[in-house]
Image (cartoon, coloured by chain):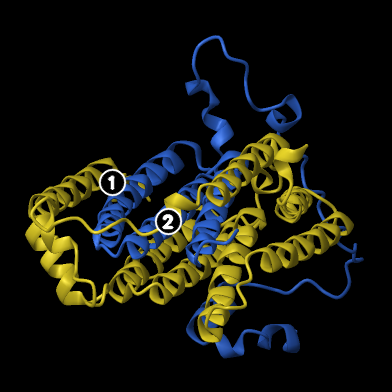
Chain colours: A yellow, B blue
Amino acid sequence: MTGIAGYELLLVSLVLAALGIWALMPGRPVSVRCLGWGLGLLAALGLGVRFFEPSGPVVENALFYTFGGSALLCGTLMITCRNPVYGALWFALATLATCGLFLVQGAPFLSAATIIVYAGAIIVTFLFVMMLAQQSGATAYDQRARQPLIAILAAFTLVGALLVTLDRSPAALQPAPPVAQIEIANPLSHPGEHESLGTLRGLGRSLFGDYLFAVEVAGTLLLVASIGAIAIAPRRSQGT
Amino acid sequence: MMTGDIERYLAVGAGLFALGAIGFLTRRNLIMIFLSVELMMHGVGLTFVSFGRLHHTLEGQVFTIFSLTVAACEAGVALALILAIFQLSKSLDLDLWTDLREAGLPNPASPEELAPPPEQEHPQYPTLTPAGRAPVLDRRTVAAQSQNPCTKNEPLVHS
């Protein structure tokens, strides 16, 4: 039992979160779901205390807790809500919160691109498909969860193992020592010591300098995927 | 024990990945399964960006942009497939397609899940006793109704 010394708060919080999500799964009565919300709140408190850093700047702490907390909350609501239209909207909110985390970490272009691709395009298309499919109202297959116990057990075992491993190997969480510029295969992707990381100029130089071939391949992939989507999609004469 | 603030971003990424995995395994709606996969990709992207910031390189962001491209392709093809499946079964239920499983495996859907849902009972309409006189409808009143819908109730009043 000495192996888990120092991890009690983390493990207890994860177990509470797992129980809470199990209680929130679709198909449970309202009283069980209220219990699930209570357990989830306790778990969030425990994890917040665990990952609190009093030495860090206040603004970054506040932004992290806002965006990270809302990302996890919206993800939980997405996988537990019974109406797929609400599920898509919660997914859009989780996407926005993730983009906020990207922004805090100094990746503004990536944040904007993710919002455009996901919240702008994918969600609208999903809602469009759902309007087609859900004309008859609530469906039986959204009211039940398949094997929630095993799924939650597997997922939370993974999270617990990841967090404990990260905590135990601090060498993996230290910045890599600088290497000589000649030895690097992609020199444009390594900005200088004092250069900012998330500028559009640096990202563009990296994408169209070091990864030009990959960009071409990605463009080809988009073309092939759009041709495939048009070929697979049913014809209009059959009534979409 | 805490080594910089990178760990909490990685923790959020792992949490998003786990939530997406739970949704992928438990939901039975095709669209919700697909959205759960996208949530898993968000978690992975957050991990990429965190490690990229830790090592002060752009590789994390560049890789996330490529995974965004793949996600867009995947969404297009998957929506086309979902529409095609919806054409065939008029439902987004994944359990209708358990015939495609590997040979020799039991059906993952339990018997009570496979049973058709119980019929919704019709609401009790009140029974009204017939009252009043039946309206007289000859060809002229019908023509007048079709010409001027405002005078629809006139024969009833005058007769």
Residue A52 picture quarter = bottom right
Q: Nearer the viewer, residue B15 or A9?
A: A9
Helix, strand or loop at disc 1?
A: loop
Q: Is residue B38 visible?
A: no
Q: Which quarter of the figure is the N terminus of chain A placed in? A: top right
Residue A189 position within the rendered picture, expressed as x and y whole percent measured from the top left: 17, 61
Residue bearing mark 2: B47
Residue at point 86% right, 58% down?
A: A35
Query: What residue do we see at 47% from left, 22% from top?
Result: B100
Position above or below: B112 against B28: above
Q: Is residue A40 left or right of residue A190?
A: right
Q: Can residue A112 be seen at all in this image of the molecule? A: yes
The image shows residue A89, relative to residue B98, as above or below, that is: below
Vertical position of residue B108 compared to residue A128: above or below: above
Quarter holding residue B154: bottom right
Amino acid at the residue labelled 1: Arg
Q: Position of residue A69 (x, y in %)?
A: 61, 69
Residue on which the image places disc 1: A235
